[in-house]
Image (spheres, rainbow, N blue to C red):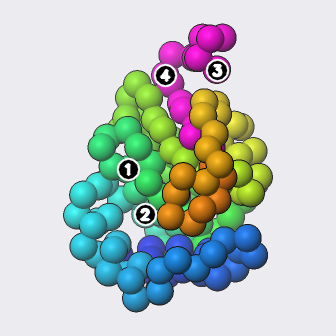
Amino acid sequence: MEACADIFNRWVDGTEWMPRIHTPDDVRRYYRETLFVNGVVTVADCQGEIGGFLALVEDRFVSALYLDQPYRSRGIGAALLGEAKRRAKTELRLWTFEHNTGAQRFYEREGLAPVRRTSGDNEEGLPDILYLWRAEPLSREEA
């Protein structure tokens, strides 16, 4: 749990446009008391190190998908997302920040489609995008 929280904390600290809303200790506490209690967390074991993780809550909502810098662009994110799709079976939802263009490219490459945008209805106050994956493709009206 702490390794996953630390991956997230390093991502926040290393992402110029991402504000630090919670202290690293608050993030660790949230992961310990909420994320790991209320969801299914899949970790990528990379030769004994946790290279990344995905948290799936409510069976169909990805609340977190983060990879540590050395493990990016190696297919690990796709494998974690594939496991989430397998567990969710029919559909999967997740939010990503509008500024996170790399994540958007990744999600779209993995078959997710943007279905909603906000101007910053989140605690960070940043515009974000809701993505949806369905085992059955979206109709034109839904996409």
Residue type of the residue flagged with mark 1:
Leu
Mark 3 sits on what residue?
143
Q: What element carries label 2?
A: strand
Identify the residue at image location x=71%, y=37%. Answer: 109
42 displayed left or right of 53: left
Residue closest to the eye, 22 or 84:
22
Residue type of the residue flagged with mark 2:
Val
Q: Is mark 1 on a helix, strand or loop?
A: strand
| N-term mark: 1 or 3 | 1
Decide: few, some or many residues near mark 4? Use Cα within 10 Å; few <14, some 14-19, many ≥20. Answer: few
Between label 3 and label 4, give the one nearer the viewer. Answer: 3
Whether residue 134 is visible: yes
Residue type of the residue flagged with mark 3:
Ala
Residue closest to the eye, 92 or 117:
117
Mark 1 sits on what residue?
56
Q: What element carries label 3?
A: loop
Where is residue 55 shown, x and y percent of the image? 40, 56
Mark 4 sits on what residue?
135
Location of the N terminus by quadrant is bottom left
Where is residue 108 shown, x and y percent of the image? 69, 37
The tag on residue 43 is 2
Identify the residue at image location x=24%, y=73%. Answer: 33
As for residue 126 lying within the magenta part, the answer is no
